[in-house]
Amino acid sequence: MRIDRFHMERTQCLYENAVRYNLSESGVQPMRVEELLGEDEGFDRAALLSTALKYPESDGSVLLRERIAALYPGSTPENVLVTNGTSEANYTALWGLLEPGDRAAVMLPTYMQTWGLSRAFGGRADAYRLRLLPAGRGEGRRWALDRASLERAVTRKTRLIVVTNPNNPTGAVLTEEEMDAIVDAARSVKAWIVADEVYRGAEVAGGPLSPTFWGRYPRVLVTSGLSKAFGLPGLRIGWIAGPPETIARLCGYHDYTTLTPTMLSDRLARAALEPGRRDAILSRTRRILRENLPRMETWIRSQGEVLDYVPPVAGAIALVGYRLPIGSVALFDRLRLEESVLITPGGHFGIGKYFRVGFGYDFEKSLEGLSRVSAFIARLRRGSASARRAASV
């Protein structure tokens, strides 16, 4: 089986520790173990330290699955398979659903793992898109579902529809009507929906959690984890929520990959998802977003008419459009080599002149990196202006 190069992850693996300023991070400042456990006297630290590092339950402990199930009304532990991160959840779900010759309709822009897996397992991925709508009817500009592209992408050969909601890299959240349109498209051809909801809980304005695809249609698998909204990427805990019979079948696929979560990750994930602590962790994430986003927006505005963006609804990521004479991957390469700054180019998400920057980490250091981006932009604009003057002589 051949598989596409996963450009975003490959370049991050190669360069994220080789640059001075990593602006490609897509979550919030990770929590420390002592911060996660806090002062809760009900948590038995001695029991944690005495834990035998054996194999835990392959699908995750019952208590962990109970606490994950609480995020999805009407579900039980039998609806949940614990995986090593959301990436393994996506891998297992698509591997278990797609056969050679199947087609998948995949939302773009997106985290391109599901695009590559759809092409590898099924052989064909068909894009449907979010498009940028202008302001109107009392609303600002927003990334919205392009329903015409969805209709083109979903055919009688479509086995599944892949959704990323909240979206990475735009930070957009689908409306109820847009979610209904995706469900209707899936129902019309009896396709599955695989909904990556890993940013659910990281809503910038606070309020209720973003709506979930859970419960809208029988053939839904939701993938998620503790990496983004929870600020716990190092635990490598993800999950699939779905119908019990499908989860049981996917457990057989999981047997061929990592087999189990780690014992310590399972125990710490239980603590993170205890309802009171869960709510406190999400409040921490939202506080970081509220504090840092205005500073990111100030920097974007400082670049005048060169940069443009639509504020994210959820997630610690800003997708920035630009008007410069350079492609996004070339911009990525030059910033890395000339300024020791790592951004994520639009080309790694299936779009053009955009780049994604994170704002969930130490923002003082991020500002230092952004100042280098500003210097590069100024240099590029001067060079472009000089070239235009020379051409006009």
Image (spheres, rainbow, N blue to C red):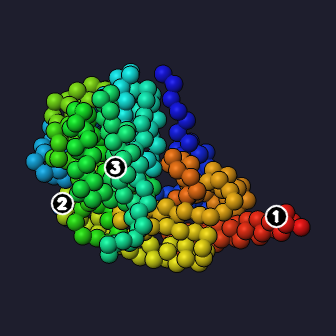
> Label 3 to label 2, Cα distance in Å?
37 Å
As helix, strand or loop, the secondary structure at mark 3 comes to: helix
Q: Residue furthest left?
A: 74
Badge 1: residue crowd in 10 Å (few <14, some 14–19, many ≥20): few
- In the displayed structure, does residue 53 sit left or right of residue 347? left
Identity of the residue drawn at 69% across and 59% down = 325
* Quadrant in the picture for residue 251: top left
Residue 225 visible in rendering: no
What percent of the width, then of the height, locates residue 214?
A: 20, 47
> Where does residue 197 sit, x and y in percent of width and height?
31, 51
Q: CB of mark 1 within 8 Å of CB of mark 2?
A: no
Under mark 3, the amino acid is Arg
Distance Cα–Cα, label 1 vs label 2 = 60 Å
Q: Give the percent coordinates (x, y) of residue 215.
A: 15, 47
Disc nearest the viewer among 3 and 2:
3
- Mark drawn on residue 387: 1
Numbered mark located on residue 147 in the image: 3
Please identify the quadrant where the C terminus is shown: bottom right
Q: Which residue is mark 2?
A: 275
Mark 3 or mark 2: name the one nearer the start of the chain.
3
* Element marked by disc 1: helix
Numbered circle sitting on residue 190: none
First of labels 1, 2 by sequence position: 2
Q: Amino acid at mark 1?
A: Ala
**What residue appears at the point 80 percent right and 66 percent down from the top-left corner?**
388
Q: Which residue sits furthest right?
A: 393
Task: Look at 22% across and 50% down and name the residue there.
Answer: 180
Mark 2 surroundings: few (<14), some (14-19) or many (≥20) residues within 10 A: some
How busy is the neighbourhood of tag 3: few (under 14 within 10 Å), some, or many (20 plus)? some
Tag 2: amino acid: Pro
**Looking at the image, can residue 384 be seen?**
yes
